[in-house]
């Protein structure tokens, strides 16, 4: 007996749209891919690969968005980018994202109209230091604040000694999962006027968004791409 993939969530009933505050925090949660059946507005052969959920919300509550990708066995990363589609909490299509040039992704609305191009520039130390940068629609976010990097560089010898002891201890205990010491990870996307519209905090792995000042159809793809990049480095 053949079993067709089913829609793995219950859409929010009409007239009961999810109440989303003007400013809120959410996390990108990758999950085991769930094959999708025929979903209006989406191409066939997709699977749900991630959800965006309000921080602190009931785990059984519908997410604010879902990320659908073509079915693949490869891990999601920016080194082998794939197109993806973002649905809202009621199952409506918000936008689609397609790889363009190297380090660039084109975001389109549900009607196919172009919304923005997301660009990604890798950070480096030589020949001169520069932070990893994410940009879209006039908003730019860089990894780490200048004062966090300054503190990291000044205290680097202490971190290095602590990291060596941590690795030695982890090897003795047989567990190396917590032996990595990482540089600053916070990213704050700002536009004109230096207002923060999207803020990622590496400690809590949560994104805070100001939907009155940035289109969520741009903010959500930025968060998803940043999350894939972060996970591919861990």
Image (cartoon, grey):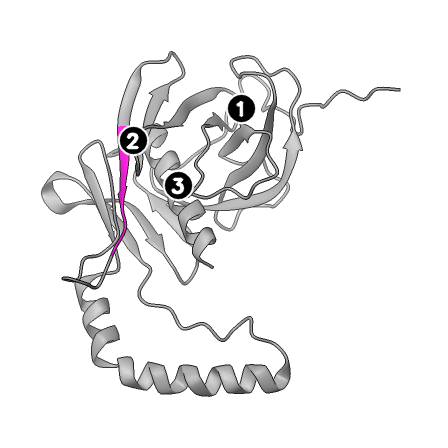
Please tell me which of labels 1 and 2 falls first in the chain: 1
Residue that sits furthest to the front in the current view: 127
Where is residue 194 shown, x and y percent of the image? 13, 46
Asked if the stretch drawn in magenta spans residue 20, the answer is: no
Residue in the picture at 40% in, 23% down: 95
Q: Secondary structure at mark 2?
A: loop
> What is the quadrant of the N terminus in the image?
top right
Which residue matches tag 3? Answer: 225
Please tell me which of labels 3 and 2 falls first in the chain: 2
- Give the Cα distance between marks 3 and 2: 15 Å
Residue 145, picture quadrant: bottom left
- Name the mark on residue 101: 2
Q: Residues within 10 Å of mark 1 (few under 14, many from 20)?
A: many
Residue in the picture at 20% in, 80% down: 154
- Name the mark on residue 90: 1
Where is residue 139 shown, x and y percent of the image? 20, 39
Asked if the stretch drawn in magenta spans residue 121, the answer is: yes
Q: Secondary structure at mark 1?
A: loop
- Give the Cα distance between marks 1 and 3: 22 Å
Where is residue 125 shown, x and y percent of the image? 21, 64
Q: Magenta residues, as a range?
A: 117-123
Above or below residue 21? Residue 96 is: above
Left or right side of 67 for 219:
left
Q: Are marks 1 and 3 in contact (CB under 8 Å)?
A: no
Report the mark closest to the observer, 1 or 3: 3
């Amino acid at each position: 007996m053949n079993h067709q993939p089913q829609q793995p969530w219950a859409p929010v009933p009409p007239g009961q749209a999810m109440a989303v505050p003007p400013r809120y925090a959410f996390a990108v949660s990758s999950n085991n891919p769930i094959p999708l059946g025929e979903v209006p507005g989406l191409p066939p052969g997709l699977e749900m690969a991630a959800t965006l959920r309000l921080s602190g919300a009931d785990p059984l509550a519908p997410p604010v968005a879902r990320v659908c990708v073509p079915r693949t066995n490869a891990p999601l990363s920016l080194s082998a980018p794939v197109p993806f589609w973002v649905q809202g909490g009621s199952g409506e299509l918000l936008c689609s994202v397609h790889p363009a040039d190297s380090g660039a992704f084109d975001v389109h609305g549900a009607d196919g109209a172009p919304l923005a191009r997301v660009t990604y520039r890798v950070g480096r130390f030589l020949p001169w230091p520069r932070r990893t940068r994410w940009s879209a629609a006039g908003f730019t976010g860089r990894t780490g604040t200048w004062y966090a990097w300054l503190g990291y560089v000044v205290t680097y010898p202490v971190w290095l000694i602590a990291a060596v002891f941590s690795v030695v201890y982890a090897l003795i205990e047989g567990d190396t999962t917590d032996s990595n010491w990482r540089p600053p990870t916070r990213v704050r996307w700002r536009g004109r006027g230096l207002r923060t519209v999207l803020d990622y905090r590496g400690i809590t792995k949560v994104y805070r968004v100001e939907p009155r000042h940035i289109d969520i159809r741009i903010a959500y793809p930025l968060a998803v791409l940043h999350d894939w990049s972060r996970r591919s480095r861990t």
